[in-house]
């Protein structure tokens, strides 16, 4: 099963500010740029390529806080698992959209494979690091936002072994965001 990451970070590598906020995503870059050719910078195409998703509790809580309408829900009908050892159920506004899972990540991936899933979207800093430490991530796409936060929640936590990123492909968008896609190689 393919497991991949599609995430945005500040130029200095943070996925959220020190308070968990994401406002900087909407005020960074060239706001006057013509983004009509690729307004979501490939996100919808990426979501169309996956058939399930695994995210961490904090990521889910952030999404829950957006109070998205059904029309705003960005993940379509893909099956979403939320990793948590403390929650037993999803927040009310995400009921029916996500399923809370508290077992082994490796067991979850094996179960997804047995259920016929082929491509999982992995989201949330701690979750991504956990998948990397189990050598489960195959591909990472990071969109660098042209802003330096100077602190916050980093994309990567402590990795147990060096992880090589190869086969880089880069897209620079008119708004000055830079998307880099890598294949992952474990040493």
Image (tube, rainbow, N blue to C red):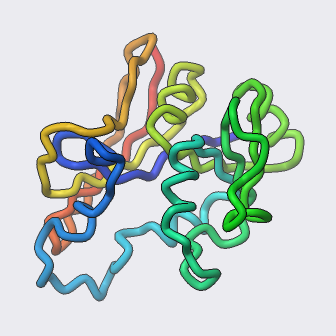
Question: Does any portion of residue 123 appear in the rendered image?
Answer: yes
The C terminus is located in which quarter?
top left
Q: Position of residue 101 (x, y in %)?
A: 76, 38
Q: Quadrant of residue 55?
A: top right
154 versus 97 height, above or below: above
Residue furthest toward the right? 114
Question: Does any portion of residue 4 appear in the rendered image?
Answer: no
Position of residue 10 in the picture relative to residue 5 (left or right): left
Residue at left offset 27%, top offset 47%: 17
Q: Quadrant of residue 162?
A: top left
Position of residue 159 in the picture relative to residue 134 (left or right): left
- The number of numbered badges drawn on the structure is 0
Residue at left offset 69%, top offset 33%: 86
99 versus 151 height, above or below: below
Most foreground residue, 10 or 96: 96
Q: Position of residue 40 (x, y in %)?
A: 38, 74
32 versus 8 height, above or below: below
Q: Position of residue 28 (x, y in %)?
A: 16, 65
Position of residue 9 in the picture relative to residue 187 (left or right): left
Residue at left offset 19%, top offset 86%: 34
76 versus 172 height, above or below: below
Most foreground residue, 108 or 152: 152
Most foreground residue, 48 or 77: 77
Q: Position of residue 91 (x, y in %)?
A: 68, 57
The N terminus is located in which quarter?
top right
Residue at left offset 52%, top offset 19%: 133
């Amino acid at each position: 099963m393919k497991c991949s990451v599609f995430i945005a970070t500040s130029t200095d590598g943070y996925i959220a500010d020190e308070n968990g906020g994401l406002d900087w995503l909407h005020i960074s870059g060239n706001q006057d740029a013509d983004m009509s050719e690729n307004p979501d910078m490939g996100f919808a195409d990426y979501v169309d390529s996956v058939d399930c998703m695994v995210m961490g509790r904090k990521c889910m809580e952030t999404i829950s806080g957006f109070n998205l309408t059904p029309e705003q829900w960005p993940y379509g009908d893909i099956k979403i698992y939320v990793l948590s050892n403390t929650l037993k159920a999803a927040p009310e506004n995400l009921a029916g959209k996500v399923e809370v899972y508290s077992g082994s990540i490796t067991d979850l991936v094996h179960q997804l494979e047995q259920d016929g899933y082929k491509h999982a979207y992995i989201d949330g800093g701690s979750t991504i690091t956990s998948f990397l430490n189990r050598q489960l991530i195959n591909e990472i796409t990071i969109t660098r936002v042209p802003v330096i936060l100077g602190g916050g929640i980093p994309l990567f936590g402590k990795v147990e072994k060096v992880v090589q990123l190869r086969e880089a492909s880069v897209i620079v968008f008119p708004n000055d965001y830079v998307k880099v896609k890598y294949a992952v190689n474990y040493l």
